[in-house]
Structures are given as C-alpha cells and as structure tokens.
Amino acid sequence: MGEMMLRTNGEQIMFNVFEAMKRHDEDPECFKVEVVDEVVEDVFAEETTTPPLERVIANSIDDLEEEWER
C-alpha cells in the first residue's frame, strides 16, 4: 500500500509515496516537473495556432513524402 510503479522502455521503478511524504521539509521545487508543463504548453500553442484542416493536410503530405522516400 502506498506504492506507485513507473514503467518505461522496459524498466520499472517503485516509489513509496508515504516515505516520500515524510520528507516534506525538503525544497518543494524538487517535487515538481515543470519541464513537462513547458513542453505541453509549447506543443499546445503550436497545434492550436494551425487550423485543423491545414494541419491534417500538412501531416498527410509529410507522411506521403516519407513513404515515397522508402
């Protein structure tokens, strides 16, 4: 109980949430993943500035070009 498992690329790590919470006196910034927030914001801004139809057409052309290069 109180464990969280993270799996990625064939590796896994187990976190004991209750043990982590006991160390609340440490710098709270180390518990945040602000880099992810920044990347999500950047991608969201890029994706939402292009109209959906234009984005689909551009992605389709890119996919076709990749197939032709093979």
Image (tube, rainbow, N blue to C red):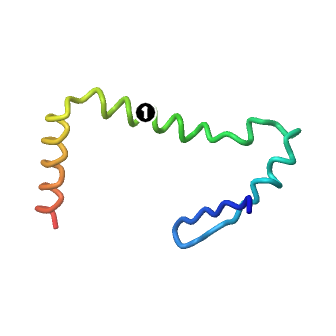
The vertical placement of 3 against 36, above or below, is below
Residue 60 horizontal side relative to residue 20, left or right? left
Mark 1 Cα-neighbour bin, 10 Å: few <14, some 14–19, many ≥20: few
Residue 14 image offset from top left, x and y in percent = 69, 65
The residue pinned by badge 1 equals 42
Q: Residue at x 54, y 73 (%)?
A: 10
Q: Nearer the viewer, residue 70 or 40?
A: 40
The vertical placement of 51 against 56, above or below, is above
Residue 36, picture quadrant: top right
* Furthest residue in direction front, as rendered: 1
Residue 59 image offset from top left, x and y in percent = 19, 46
> What's the amino acid at mark 1?
Asp
Q: Residue at x 52, y 34 (%)?
A: 38
Q: Residue at x 14, y 49 (%)?
A: 60
Q: Quadrant of the C terminus?
A: bottom left
Residue 7, picture quadrant: bottom right
Residue 16, picture quadrant: bottom right
Residue 15 image offset from top left, x and y in percent = 72, 60
Q: Which of 28 and 55 is in front in this view?
A: 28
Q: In which quarter of the image is the N terminus?
A: bottom right
The vertical placement of 64 against 7, above or below, is above
Residue 40 image offset from top left, x and y in percent = 46, 37
Disc 1, SS: helix
What number of labels is visible? 1
Q: Which residue is drawn at 24% across and 30% down?
A: 50
Residue 60 horizontal side relative to residue 16, left or right? left
* Furthest residue in direction bottom, as rendered: 10
